[in-house]
Each structure stands twice: as structure tokens, then as C-alpha cells.
Image: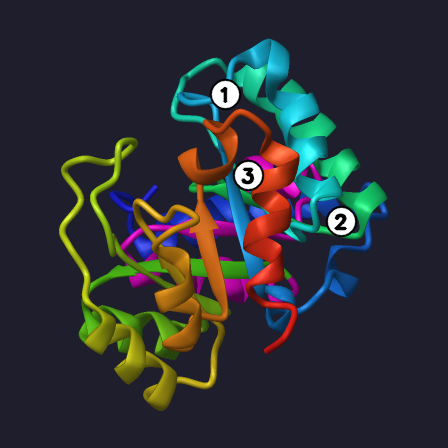
Amino acid sequence: CGQLSNLALASTYQIVAGKFCNTGSSWMSRPGSQSIKGLYAIADTSVIAEAELADEVTSVLRGGCRVIQYRDKSFDRDKRSRQAVGLAQTCREFGAIFIVNDDVELAIAVEADGVHVGRDDSTVTAIKQNFPGLIVGASCYNSMELAGQAANAGADYLAFGSFFPSTTKPEASPADIETLLKAKQTFKLPVVAIGGIMEDNAPGLVSSGADAIAVISGVFSTPDSYISSRKFTELFENI
């Protein structure tokens, strides 16, 4: 959606908003951005088999994770809708935040708590104008400039990375700890670290001030996602 104009986005979202409000949903009362903390697990369907998705997410939530992002880059709308509905319900049962990657219409349709978008801050602006109660996270890569633009546009949290080589995004540009430290000093928003984060390299990011660590393979490609979730969660319990 970053290729659309801000006006086009606004028009599309207003239509969706009208349909959504007619359902009587309570998206305006969703949890705030300060709930973005601890383990932020990304349920990426390129990593998790469809038959295992629900069980894997449940296992991670049982381990203490309280933020789940659903990430599916396919064009199968029926599958995406079915999976997102199920994960949204599971997150509600655990009192966890449910974020949809780069699809505000799907996020609204399944009553997600928020949506995560890329570098186009006009997307952030349009979403916040039409859905002020929706948590909006923005990818900032290694750029304080992009972070400033996203914050000014109304983003609720800022994601930086890739801090380590990533198997799911091997082409991602590297980020450094200095950017993370500057972001913590500059912005009064939750800062999320992402990219190749595993049990052995996560402590340095947490000690540098990351409010949350976004993890894919580090939980979903391990022998026991519950244990992995527990270990990541424990990093934040004594802060």
C-alpha cells in the first residue's frame, strides 16, 4: 500500500472504517502502544507450516510472549483471512497484542490491535487519521531520519534492524547498536529491535534499551517454541 497516494489510502480506509464501525466493534478501546514490550514474535508463514501455525503461536504465548505479528506475503485472501481470524482470537484469549503486517484492511476486518508498515510515513498518517485507536508500527531500518518521520506521522512504535544476519530477510541492511541507543534517547515511543535475533545475541539488545525484540526463527524454528519464548521473555522480567 506504500505505492498509493495518501489521498487514495484515506479514501480506501474510510470505506473500510464505515464497514467496520457498522459491526459495533470496540477497536477504539484496544491496548495502547506501551503494551509493545518484551518478546514480539512474528508468525511468518514462510517459516511456519500452515498446519502448525495455530499450535506454534499458542505455544509461544504460553511461554510468555504478549505481542504477535501475523506476516503472510501470499495473495491467498481466504487463507490470510482464516489464519488472521484464528490468531486474533487466540491472542485475545491470552491478553496479547495482535499485529498484522502491512495490511490495514485485514487488520480492521479481524479486529487486530494494530498494523505494521514499511518506510512510507504517508501510510502511517492515513491509518492514524482514519483509525486513531489502531496501533501502528513503522520499520525504520537503521535510519533516525525515517524514525523521526514515522514518529511525526503518528507511529506508535519504531522498529530498527536488521541487527544480525537474517535468514528470513537476507537482503536486509544492517543496523547498529548506536542507532538503538540514539532512538531510546530521542523518542518517547517503544523501540523494537529486529533481525536475526537469537537467544545468544538478544541480551545485548535488551541491555541497550530495546523495549521489545522481534523474533521469527529464534522461536519458530527451534525444537521447542515454548521454551524459546520463555527464555526470551525472561530477559525482560528483571528490568
Provide the residue span drawn in magenta.
104-133
**Distance in Å between CA atoms under marks 3 and 1:** 23 Å
**39 with respect to 87 (left or right):** left
Q: Residues within 10 Å of mark 1 (few under 14, many from 20)?
A: some
Label 3 close to label 1 by CB (< 8 Å): no
SS class of the residue under badge 2? helix
Mark 3 or mark 2, earlier in chain: 2
Q: Is residue 43 above or below residue 199?
A: above
Residue in view at x 26 percent, y 32 percent: 167
- Magenta stretch encompasses residue 214: no
Residue in view at x 24 percent, y 71 percent: 177
On the image, which quarter does residue 236 sit in?
Answer: bottom right
Which of these two is toward me, 209 or 89?
209
Question: Looking at numbered disc 3 in the image, what kind of residue is underneath it?
Answer: Glu
Q: Would you say residue 78 is visible in this rendering?
A: no
Q: Is residue 140 above or below residue 23?
A: below
Q: Would you say residue 223 is visible in this rendering?
A: yes
Q: Return the x and y of residue 220 as percentages of the image width and height.
A: 51, 30
Question: Looking at numbered disc 1 in the image, what kind of residue is underneath it?
Answer: Ile
- The circle on residue 21 is 2
On the image, which quarter does residue 171 sit in?
Answer: top left
**Distance in Å between CA atoms under marks 3 and 2:** 13 Å
Mark 1 or mark 2, earlier in chain: 2
Q: Return the x and y of residue 164 as percentages of the image width and height.
A: 23, 50
Q: Nearer the viewer's eye, disc 1 or disc 2? A: 1
SS class of the residue under badge 1? loop
Mark 3 = which residue?
105
Mark 1 = which residue?
48
Label 1 close to label 2 by CB (< 8 Å): no
Q: How many marks?
A: 3
Which of these two is toward me, 205 or 111?
205
